[in-house]
Amino acid sequence: MVRIGIYGATGYTGFELIKLLLRHPQAEIVFATARSAAGQRLSDVFPTTIDLPLVGADQADLSAVDLIFTCLPHGAPELITIAEAALAAGKRVIDFSDTFRILDADVYTRWRGKPHPAPELLSAAVYGLPELHRTAVRSARLVANTGCYPLTVILPLHPLMKAGLLADRTVIADSKSGVSGAGRSLALKTHFGEAHENFSAYNIGRSHRHIAEMEQETGARIIFSPHLLPVFRGILSTLYVNLKPGIKVDEVRAAYDIFAAEPFVKLLPPGKLPELCHVVNTNQLLIGLQAVDEAEGRYILVACEDNLIKGASGQAVQNMNVMFALEETLGLI
Amino acid sequence: MVRIGIYGATGYTGFELIKLLLRHPQAEIVFATARSAAGQRLSDVFPTTIDLPLVGADQADLSAVDLIFTCLPHGAPELITIAEAALAAGKRVIDFSDTFRILDADVYTRWRGKPHPAPELLSAAVYGLPELHRTAVRSARLVANTGCYPLTVILPLHPLMKAGLLADRTVIADSKSGVSGAGRSLALKTHFGEAHENFSAYNIGRSHRHIAEMEQETGARIIFSPHLLPVFRGILSTLYVNLKPGIKVDEVRAAYDIFAAEPFVKLLPPGKLPELCHVVNTNQLLIGLQAVDEAEGRYILVACEDNLIKGASGQAVQNMNVMFALEETLGLI
Amino acid sequence: MVRIGIYGATGYTGFELIKLLLRHPQAEIVFATARSAAGQRLSDVFPTTIDLPLVGADQADLSAVDLIFTCLPHGAPELITIAEAALAAGKRVIDFSDTFRILDADVYTRWRGKPHPAPELLSAAVYGLPELHRTAVRSARLVANTGCYPLTVILPLHPLMKAGLLADRTVIADSKSGVSGAGRSLALKTHFGEAHENFSAYNIGRSHRHIAEMEQETGARIIFSPHLLPVFRGILSTLYVNLKPGIKVDEVRAAYDIFAAEPFVKLLPPGKLPELCHVVNTNQLLIGLQAVDEAEGRYILVACEDNLIKGASGQAVQNMNVMFALEETLGLI
Amino acid sequence: MVRIGIYGATGYTGFELIKLLLRHPQAEIVFATARSAAGQRLSDVFPTTIDLPLVGADQADLSAVDLIFTCLPHGAPELITIAEAALAAGKRVIDFSDTFRILDADVYTRWRGKPHPAPELLSAAVYGLPELHRTAVRSARLVANTGCYPLTVILPLHPLMKAGLLADRTVIADSKSGVSGAGRSLALKTHFGEAHENFSAYNIGRSHRHIAEMEQETGARIIFSPHLLPVFRGILSTLYVNLKPGIKVDEVRAAYDIFAAEPFVKLLPPGKLPELCHVVNTNQLLIGLQAVDEAEGRYILVACEDNLIKGASGQAVQNMNVMFALEETLGLI
């Protein structure tokens, strides 16, 4: 059994993580922290779950766990303190924020406009994407769990980069995300009356900070247009790529054979495109490929996932399984 | 032309009111106030509307208007100050809050648990429901615009009370409202992730303060169960009444003839029930009547309206039309 | 391992059943039938599930299974044929339709206006509600899986009936259901443009055929108002009951202790009401109790469930677990 | 007064048209046809509208009208017959289908894979987009009302083409449409359970037939990815264009000055992007412009409209106003 502590249990990703771990046969939740709900039980907040006590972060007993999941705000001082303490105590850490995803502190500074809050921890960090970095994840002490948007760009592009098929490094990613991606903190943009029956683009072009990890992991240059969908869960990204002219679509499809043994990534058959409803409540990432013009090398990729599972908490459990030498699909099917 | 000032223009009812007034051939908006958006133009907040400047309440020129609409929080000190100043200056007031709806200050105190903030204004107040109080509204200086839920209870019950058909004073009102009824202020309950795809009951039984005005206007005793629907607009109420045993359904239907000349209230033909989609974006209140058991006198009524229009801003324009001797339907069809 | 055949795998309840059985450690799906999709694989229809071949009903090999689930239209000739063949072959049957729920053929005829299509099978049938009929379900050959609406009325009323607390046999059930309850067959009422952002009542009073099983199981007389909610999953019912005057709310709450050991039914603590979001994707039925007037004995109950799980496929798996002497919660938590 | 006949009054665009015409001070609806609802009144179908009788197409009296609107399926034999009869009788026609939008019959054949059903009518047809063809619309006998998707591509690109700013003729249009675009006919794709909480791409690349009119009106080559949004109304298109390198964003913005006098097209200020909620229930098309890389000439445009109004029925009323020398905004603000 992996003994687990969770920091930040009452946000959307924290609660999703708990639901997954309760079904996991090798996981034992030892403690869970919350800020405003500390002192209550999880079942007080959400009556169909377990009677887990929610404690303040300062009451969590690090010595009783093997692994902690940190579902805390990006770069928060509390997060740095907790991660340092856990690593110092020989515990392993899976962090949900994007604090440790950009492995080069200078790149972090360039995108954030301020220095990294804990550059000394970056050397311990591994980008938590088993499909690309399984070996490194296995022995990692600090895993930076992947971002929700980036996964829908990185995984579809990876085989094309690997096979050297891209003619133009610049890729357009038109992405659409459910509202849960913005978290449980109140904001006018995610007020029901503003998000419901609405649809909007935001931070389009080269401004969204998730571009940094997309580029780190693909080597491509990404023009990224996020949009807010009036659904709770799910991300669908439509990618426009320019491949070397004249390549046949079958050859392009063959590049995706490197995912053949992956349990959670799948290229759909010719003529089929993935939809949000296919992936919601699963740990799957589906990819569809459509040739627009073989002669010119123009292709469209459509990728989708559940942002709270494959894009966050499911991915975290998958990383845990790899780190603790468990069956990688355990608790995820 | 009626010269108009609006206090609280950027909430859901204030903005809906502005959209209605812009179509109204006899209305001229002279000023509109906002709190956080003061200094901007309305088109900065919402680009398809007009370039109306939004001012602070202290910059509004009362002398330039005939009528003010106050879309401010219930019982707010600012509201009392503004209403007093306007009435003192000989202006007429239509207030959207429930501050002046309960005409008996003692009843107000009993439901609110605290004294009325301006009992001296109550004598000037008229409950702003033209279908019941048209004559009083015509000459009123201070109109207390009806509450959104109450209208769906008062109008269906009124003919039954008037005709003396009710055998049991106690009526069950099971009501379901869209989220806009809770306003534009941020709250976890109206956060997209909590309200979307959810449905819940709240304040059921005898606790919701809107019961006071339902009872004032009907003489019935109301057991009231409000529910929160995952839509933006609309209220549908299902009412369970016990009429005198043995009355034929046709006789019950005949009681609704008192609405025959009303442009905005309609009893549907036998076998038809109203749906939210029928009334959204209209100033109509529709009623359906279903006999459960004529011998026992058991009947069900279904009533629905757009809570932002007939339940708030459309009703306010209807009141204005009555007050200024305009065609009652002007700007509302 | 229980070897299972599923008739009607591509409707909403059939597909939900398959998803549950795939997680169930003691279930093996041997065959699944479909009408228009016969010849395809389940993963052709829905890419994140398994490669199960879909066969025509005539190609299903009854001899290879222990149990069949029939997810077919109410009273369909095909259903009767299949049920008869399975029972004759010594197989056990869990039927999702309401064909076998009314155990008295005369009552069936009265509600349906036509004779029962297979009265000779009724003697083998058990109403599939373990919380009330666990012993009978255990040995039943033909289990009539409960209806979705009825469960939200029967379970909250059962303790009150059992404890003799009801003063008035007549109970008002104001129920609201997600659209999946109407199935996957096309109809204008469930067309996106008609159901989305809409809310409506239908078949109110004494006309909905589900009243028959509510009354059979409770002994109460039910006035039933179903409504269509613009969500996919979930039912919430608000029940108005008249108990014997003067009973204290604590005594009423105590009646629910008979559910104390039930894993899937729960009375919430005082002051708490269940919401759809609590039960969606679970096999739980939650109940909230609110006293309106202890002296008069007026109470409101709010109950909710996921209509596709506790109201259909989860309930079916629970019945299967009971019938095959498995842990009752297996595959359901 | 313009005397009007409507063919196909009970679909989504026909009904929206009627609602607009009822507010129009110079329009008189003389007849409205329906297929299955013929014999009923419009208020039987939708109780808050007028008591307009719905007749069969063969009962419509063409001699009593000046103008007909045809809201019938693309290329239907019935549509051709009606259009021919109306034109022969000297009446004017505004057609909602895409039958007469492609003015070159050969291009029609290439995109449709079959010959045009009435090539002899094409010489009378004008593409019904006042912003580009106001003079031609004024005197047109047959107006082909614009398609819903195309408008969100044509209007944002028009100033760039006109000013000669495009460096690359190929433009990517990633479009997202509400479900009403698929009409009121039943289909699994628009069944509530399939479209709700879902999001999907379809016909991506070079296959959607609306590309033909986009290219006719812009001269660009369009890579078009339509997606289905889980909302009823609205289209938002995100366009990726390559302009001549080194042009300053202010110069690009200046190209949109040609819309300065247009009442229904608006470029938002720098830093602002349009959202569906801004345009729903209006006849406005809003455009946002974002420079990605001035040096490279990479820009993103975001355009949105209400597909049932500016994208269909509002546009038709605007065309009517132009054809009959009325104020162009009449009935549309």
Image: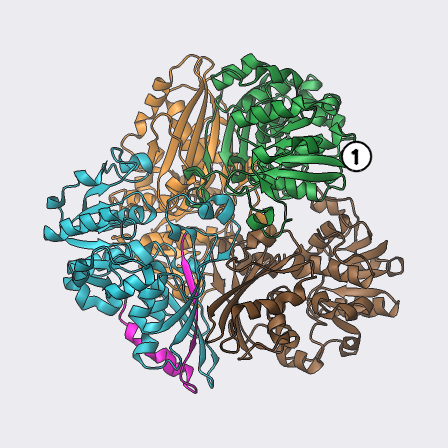
Chain colours: A brown, B orange, C green, D cyan
Tell whether C27 sits left or right of B314.
right
Q: Nearer the viewer, residue C55 or D312?
A: C55
**Magenta stretch, residue numbers:** D233-262
Q: Say which amino acid is labelled 1.
A: Glu
Q: Which residue is mark 1?
A: C327
Q: Decide if residue D266 is in sight here.
A: no
Residue at 58% over, 15% down? C119
Q: Position of residue B275 (x, y in %)?
A: 41, 37
Q: Position of residue C61 (x, y in %)?
A: 64, 33
Q: Nearer the viewer, residue D265 or C43?
A: C43
Q: Chain of mark 1?
A: C
Q: Decide if residue B158 is in sight here.
A: yes
Give the image quarter of residue A210.
bottom right
Report crowding for label 1: few under 14, some 14 to 19, many 20 or more residues within 10 A (C-alpha).
few
Question: Dividing the image into 4 quarters, which one contains the C terminus of chain D?
Answer: bottom left
Q: Is residue D18 above or below residue C138?
A: below
Q: Nearer the viewer, residue C169 or B69?
A: C169
Q: Position of residue B301 (x, y in %)?
A: 43, 28
Q: Nearer the viewer, residue A166 or B137?
A: A166
Tell whether A163 sits left or right of B307.
right
Residue at 60% over, 54% down? A279
Residue at 23% over, 57% down? D330
Magenta segment includes B261:
no
Q: Is residue B255 above or below residue A37?
A: above
Q: Position of residue D248 (x, y in %)?
A: 41, 85
Q: Secondary structure at mark 1?
A: loop
